[in-house]
Image (spheres, rainbow, N blue to C red):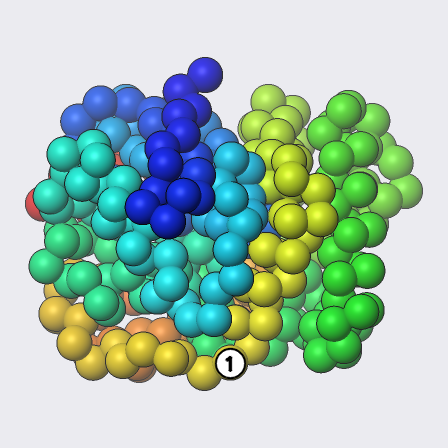
Amino acid sequence: MNSQVISLPDGRQLGYFIVGKGNPVMYFHGTASSRLEVMLLTELAYAAKLQIIGIDRPGYGLSTFAPRKSLGAFNGDVNFLADHLGINRFGVLGWSGGGVFALAYLALFPSRVTKAVLVGAPALPFDVATAHNTPFARYAMQVPFLGLLALKRMSLQVLKANEDVGAFLRSRAGKHMLHGCSKDDLTFFSNLAWVTLMYQSMAEAFRQGNQGVKAVFQEHKLFMKPWDISLSMIPAGKLVIWHGADDKTCRVSNAYLISRSVVGAYLEIFPEKGHCVMFGNIKKLGKIFLSD
């Protein structure tokens, strides 16, 4: 395993995982996932000669939990790791909930970023009721007790599914989960090797038990608020936004909202594609980072 841990100046631990060698790319994993998500990008790393660095945000995986009251609170951890690795400038890639933190990093440290790509990312304030087509989420997130209880149940389901992903997908709960996916996303979930890696990454998010649950809840609460940083300082040409038109996890309307908030951003909508659009366009994604 390529997982490593470093100590931050305040005494917290920061976990990260590296795949590939070459031009560095900092990877911001999805919400309720972990640094291990970069294993899904191994093909990209070697085909495009990239060093992709997945970082556990506080409370996930190997990273110590810490309250985060702003979107930019994680940036100091990213910079400390980059300096530790001797990396001055790098690409940024964020998928799903990770796209919010990737954009926050770009907005505050544009000089360190060669190119940033957001895939299937929510715009803020995000209506969590639209995520995964579960209207209950809106009320759960507004009532802390209900939100934490719902996420605790989800974490237990993820951990159980990770024990035997094939059996989970055949179960009632698994079929219910698949029912909420787009047709295109179902092609990825039919690949047992791919979905096993995905669930491994998600299970790692809850390595710390309740701390992982708190981290997921905390991020959803941040997503429900307007941007607390200005996006106006992002240089034109540095941001690429990808979104699947049939994304049911994070609706395509989010991509249009983000693109209108960042002058000079490049937006590409993929017809008939879903939330996993990034993994079906590895070569095209590699060219974006190679261009720099």
Residue at image x 38%, y 80%? 228
Q: Which quadrant is home to the C terminus? A: top left
Which percent across, then down, holds residue 48? 22, 29
In the rendered structure, the answer to whether residue 267 lies left or right of residue 200 reads left
Residue that carries the numbered disc 1 in the rendered image: 225
Which percent across, then down, holds residue 285? 29, 43
Q: Tag 1's secondary structure?
A: loop
Q: Which quadrant is home to the N terminus? A: top left
What is the residue that sits farthest to the top in this orientation?
1
The relative height of residue 52 versus residue 94 in the rendered view (above or below) is: above
The mark total stands at 1
Residue at image x 71%, y 48%? 210
Residue placed most toward the observer, 125 or 166: 125
Q: Give the amino acid type for the residue marked by disc 1 in the picture.
A: Lys
In the rendered structure, the answer to whether residue 91 lies left or right of residue 224 reads left
Is residue 71 visible to the viewer in this orientation of the structure?
yes
Q: Quadrant of residue 76?
A: bottom left
Which percent across, then down, holds residue 88? 11, 43
Residue at image x 12%, y 70%? 236
Residue placed most toward the observer, 267 or 82: 82
